[in-house]
């Protein structure tokens, strides 16, 4: 493996061409799933739209509506577009962010590979491997936040590699801001960012930089994500009274609770169900090639940064260890990581082998599953709420028929997806009293909903029931003055008696 840069100036238009192709393919896939009625099947897809909408559409609009459980960037980006009713109800603006994010991820991966090794074949193969996985392709066709995670982390790694190749000048503005954006998208990015900073320090060390210089440069890179994480925690403290909300939103019922190896096995199970051996084994081979390239070549050492993407595995592992129910979706970042590591590994092969190897990996992936396979694990898992969604129509019909404009108390933490469903019946977020309304919500919990709402909707089944369910069960007087008028899909609707 020669220790030199590509012999010709890398064609700067190639990554952009690849990104444009991914943008077109992603748009077509999004149209396909929207036409099939699957774009908003996942309850979190609808919940993310609600959180973005409530920043302006709320009983108490303002910055505090950004929230303290989910990270804010996806909702801030969508806050204005989602005020358009058609985009909110269809999820179009959130889906557009996802499609653009995947194009950005493809651009970043291609830019990293082509700039460092000159391999257009490997760069194109990376984009194909990202987009032909039916689970990745489906999720990029929804308003979920994983595509934005892929876009921001891939861009952050590519810009960090370019920063290292410039000698790691300070400040590290571009890579630092990209990593900061990733850290405000999903919690997996916190781990990926830590790994990126550590690997950057190793690259500088590999290139002979003094320990003091290495530490200073790494600290400047880390400063940007550290600042935004600190601001997020301050916002959490101001809005919910906790520096970091780490529990209270799931029932610890996973058999991996307290069992680290079982938790690791579940992460692995999720990865294989989402990608299969045709994606995982080439990634292992790619990781070996990347490690060898780091040892043998100072020029190509920054390619090792792509290994930081695998650090995302630590989050689902810890969640399962803490008892969080198994979700196949939580392993999806590892599918994207596998595609990226495989592509970088291909770029490090001798040029005469790259084409055949890339074709073999892509062919094996396509033989394993069709890109638009509706039986793919994530497509199926995303529809797990469909029966409940249909069941809730009874409560929706009663509420719509008898609505008189009074407030509906409902836990957004448990029923945000149902709030979105109710938008099709003409309800806005400002019609609901929820956790984001601060003291109004707290008083209603403590004193009872009688003086604050004309309706109460309670989730009675999912995750052991929501906070309102447990309040009513502990204190039978909490719902005094209300009567149960409709139910379905795990939701019970109560109406204040003086409204009759």
Image (cartoon, rainbow, N blue to C red):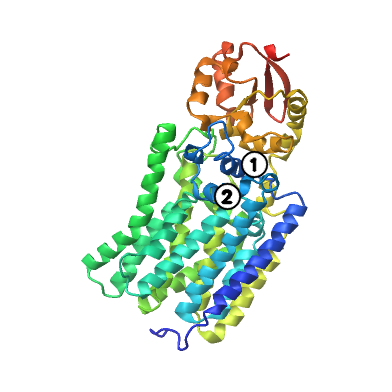
266 in relation to 252, above or below: below
Name which quarter of the figure residue 416 lies in: top right
State the residue at coordinates (36%, 71%).
Answer: 164
Instruction: Quadrant for the N terminus, please.
Output: bottom left
In terms of secondary structure, where does tag 1 sit? helix
Instruction: Quadrant for the C terminus, please.
Output: top right
181 in relation to 460, above or below: below
Distance (Cα) linking label 2 and label 1: 17 Å
Between 48 and 392, the one lying in front of the other is 48
The numbered mark at residue 451 is none
Left or right: 227 as drawn, with respect to 481: left
In terms of secondary structure, where does tag 2 sit? helix
Q: Where is residue 372 drawn, in percent x and y?
A: 72, 60
Query: What residue does disc 2 label?
Result: 78
The numbered mark at residue 43 is 1
State the residue at coordinates (38%, 45%).
Answer: 231
Name which quarter of the figure residue 210 lies in: bottom left
Name which quarter of the figure residue 30 lies in: bottom right
Q: Where is residue 131 drawn, in percent x and y?
A: 63, 65
């Amino acid at each position: 493996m020669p220790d030199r840069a590509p012999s010709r100036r890398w064609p700067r238009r190639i990554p952009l061409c690849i990104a444009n192709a991914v943008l077109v393919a992603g748009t077509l896939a999004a149209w396909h799933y929207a036409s099939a009625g699957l774009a908003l099947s996942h309850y979190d897809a609808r919940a993310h739209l609600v959180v973005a909408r409530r920043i302006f559409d709320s009983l108490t609009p303002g910055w505090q509506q950004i929230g303290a459980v989910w990270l804010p960037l996806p909702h801030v980006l969508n806050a204005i577009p989602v005020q358009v009713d058609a985009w909110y109800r269809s999820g179009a603006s959130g889906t557009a962010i996802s499609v653009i994010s995947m194009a950005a991820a493809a651009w970043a991966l291609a830019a990293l590979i082509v700039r460092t090794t000159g391999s257009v074949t490997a760069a194109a193969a990376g984009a194909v491997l990202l987009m032909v996985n039916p689970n990745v392709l489906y999720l990029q066709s929804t308003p979920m936040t994983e595509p934005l995670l892929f876009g921001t982390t891939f861009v952050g790694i590519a810009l960090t590699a370019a920063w290292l190749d410039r000698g790691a000048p300070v400040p590290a503005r571009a890579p630092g801001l990209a990593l900061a954006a990733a850290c405000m998208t999903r919690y997996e990015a916190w781990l990926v960012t830590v790994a990126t900073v550590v690997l950057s320090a190793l690259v500088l060390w590999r290139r002979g930089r003094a320990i003091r210089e290495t530490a200073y440069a790494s600290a400047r890179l880390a400063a940007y994500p550290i600042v935004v994480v600190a601001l997020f925690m301050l916002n959490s403290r101001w809005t919910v009274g906790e520096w970091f909300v780490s529990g209270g939103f799931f029932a610890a019922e996973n058999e991996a609770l307290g069992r680290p190896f079982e938790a690791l096995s579940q992460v692995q199970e999720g990865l294989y169900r989402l990608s299969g051996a045709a994606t995982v084994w080439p990634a292992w081979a790619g990781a070996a090639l990347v490690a060898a390239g780091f040892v043998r070549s100072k020029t190509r050492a920054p390619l090792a940064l792509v290994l930081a993407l695998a650090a995302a595995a630590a989050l689902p592992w810890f969640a399962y260890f803490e008892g969080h129910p198994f979700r196949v979706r939580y392993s999806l970042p590892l599918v994207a990581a596998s595609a990226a590591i495989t592509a970088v590994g291909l770029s490090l092969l001798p040029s005469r082998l790259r084409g055949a190897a890339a074709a073999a990996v892509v062919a094996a992936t396509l033989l394993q599953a069709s890109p638009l396979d509706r039986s793919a694990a994530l497509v199926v898992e995303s529809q797990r709420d469909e029966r409940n969604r249909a069941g809730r129509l009874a409560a929706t019909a009663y509420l719509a028929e008898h609505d008189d404009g009074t407030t509906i108390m409902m836990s957004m933490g448990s029923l945000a997806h149902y709030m979105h469903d109710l938008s099709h019946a003409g309800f806005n977020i400002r019609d609901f009293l929820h956790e984001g309304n601060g003291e109004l919500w707290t008083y209603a919990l403590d004193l009872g909903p009688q003086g604050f709402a004309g309706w109460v909707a309670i989730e009675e089944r999912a995750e052991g029931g929501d906070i309102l369910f447990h309040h009513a069960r502990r204190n039978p007087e909490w719902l005094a003055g209300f009567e149960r008028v409709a139910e379905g899909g795990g939701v019970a609707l109560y109406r204040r008696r003086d409204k009759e």
